Image (spheres, helix red, strand yellow):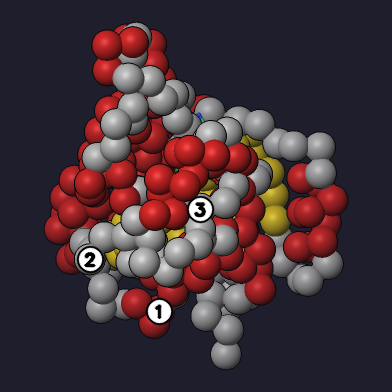
Amino acid sequence: MSMLTGANAIVTGGARGIGRAIVRQFVAEGANVAVFDVAFPEDFETFADEMRAKGAKVEAYAVDITNTESADKAIEEMHAAFGSLDVLVNNAGITRDKLMLRMTDDDWDKVLAVNLKGAFIMTRGTARIMMRQRSGKIVNISSVVGVMGNAGQANYAASKAGLIGLTKSTAKEFASRGITVNAVAPGYVETEMTHVLSEEQRNAFLAVIPLRRGCSPEEVADTITFLSSPRANYITGQVINVDGGMIM
Ligand code: NAD
């Protein structure tokens, strides 16, 4: 049997990159997916149609996850349309990299708002439903940078470290209701987010990766799919690094 047969999931930031790889893999494993994103690329509907052709329900919700009102409304709409809410993947994230002395309040606030507060808003909104259901799986996408820090990414690293605290606290709070919460911490993944890095920055990452290559979005999605499935029922509050051995 497939890993996610009949599960109804929300993937934030699922319009492109790692999020889109998660949607593709969830559908391959039998799930239906609501994609919550602020920006849908032109080819998204073609992608969604491909997913629907496999028999899945895949719907796009234009939502800014930093806005409580619109996030809560979209969660309610999704729940009514799909019938249950079994999986939340907090994947939406942004970077505004700058050295500390050049970092503005706005650079700090925007990154914390999307990466950390957005995950809080989505977790609170969906947990209401999962608690009533007495089941659910939440997976937060952190980063190795949240564990080991990175020069020029104080805002991003703080947000990703914050997600680990959110993961562990909600794992403890929700456990008695049958809800698990885990985090995945990818290392260097080849997406549009990392294509903006210079050759020098890229080489600096590759030099500290024992497997000597970047990660594909599909390899991150593999771990997220596992943690979202009943095969991970006894795992909660964990941070799984998907980083080619960068952190051991
Ligand atoms: P990406 O930039 O390709 O995709 C991020 C998606 O989030 C986009 O579709 C964007 O529109 C959406 N988004 C941004 N702000 C939003 C908001 N306010 N509301 C709703 N959606 C919003 O990034 P990616 O590389 O696919 O990264 C996905 C996640 O993985 C992020 O959380 C990122 O921090 C994390 N991550 C990425 C890497 C990497 O190397 N690419 C490494 C570690 C962690």
Q: Amino acid at mark 2?
A: Met
Q: Is residue 26 left or right of residue 89?
A: right
Q: Amino acid at mark 1?
A: Pro
| Whether the residue under disc 3 has CB within 8 Å of ligand 1 | yes
**Quarter of the image holding residue 184?**
bottom left
Q: Is disc 3 placed on a helix, strand or loop?
A: loop
Q: Which mark, by number, is residue 189? A: 3
Q: Is residue 77 above or below residue 181?
A: above
The residue labelled by disc 1 is 230
Crowd band around label 1 with a 10 angstrom C-alpha radius: few (<14), some (14–19), many (20+) = some
The residue labelled by disc 2 is 248
Distance between the Cα atoms at labels 3 and 2? 18 Å
- The N terminus, quarter of image: bottom right
Residue placed farthest to the bottom in the image?
1
Q: Is disc 2 placed on a helix, strand or loop?
A: loop
Crowd band around label 3 with a 10 angstrom C-alpha radius: few (<14), some (14–19), many (20+) = many
Q: Is residue 4 left or right of residue 61?
A: left
Q: Amino acid at mark 3?
A: Val
Distance between the Cα atoms at labels 2 and 1? 27 Å
